[in-house]
Amino acid sequence: TDLRKSIDGLAVLVKEGFDLDPFSPCLFVFCNRQRDKLKILHWEHNGFWLYYRRLERGTFQWPAETNSSPLKISRRELRWLLDGLSLEQHLAHPEVTARTIL
């Protein structure tokens, strides 16, 4: 994605390019071609947040298949991505979905 886009440009891309609602509670993450910069667009209450991250060394492990289409990831996977890890961490503990107390 062209990271020269501002809040308005990214919001239009979310709405028209991906047919998603930029005012939803989601975080929309964009990465440049060199994979060393990220922007995150987030609507909160009465305005947009725009987070920008530039790596001084290394790259983000951006999934190759997401170059033109959105990919839904969890907050945990976003943390992995921001830490320079792949979205697939096979050694990570799996989520426990059972909600019972003994």
Image: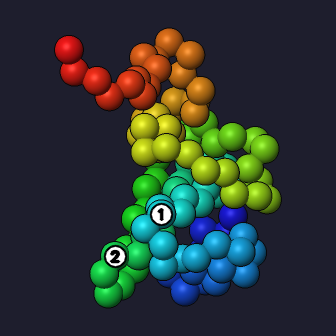
Give the side of residue 22 with respect to residue 34, left or right.
left
Callout 1: SS: loop
**Horizontal and vertical percent for residue 11?**
57, 80
Callout 2: SS: strand
In the picture shown, does residue 10 fall above or below 28?
A: below
In the picture shown, does residue 30 fall above or below 95?
A: below
Labelled disc at residue 44 = 2
Give the side of residue 67 with respect to residue 11, left or right.
right
Quarter residue 29 falls in = bottom right
**Horizontal and vertical percent for residue 58?**
53, 36
Which residue shows up at 72% across the image and 70% down it? 18
Q: Quadrant of the C terminus?
A: top left
- Residue found farthest to the left: 102
Q: Amino acid at mark 2?
A: Glu
Q: Nearer the viewer, residue 2 or 87?
A: 87
C-alpha distance separating marks 1 and 2: 10 Å
Residue annotated with mark 1: 26
**Horizontal and vertical percent for residue 17?**
75, 75
Scheme by which the image is coloured: rainbow
Marks 1/2 in contact by CB < 8 Å: the verdict is: no
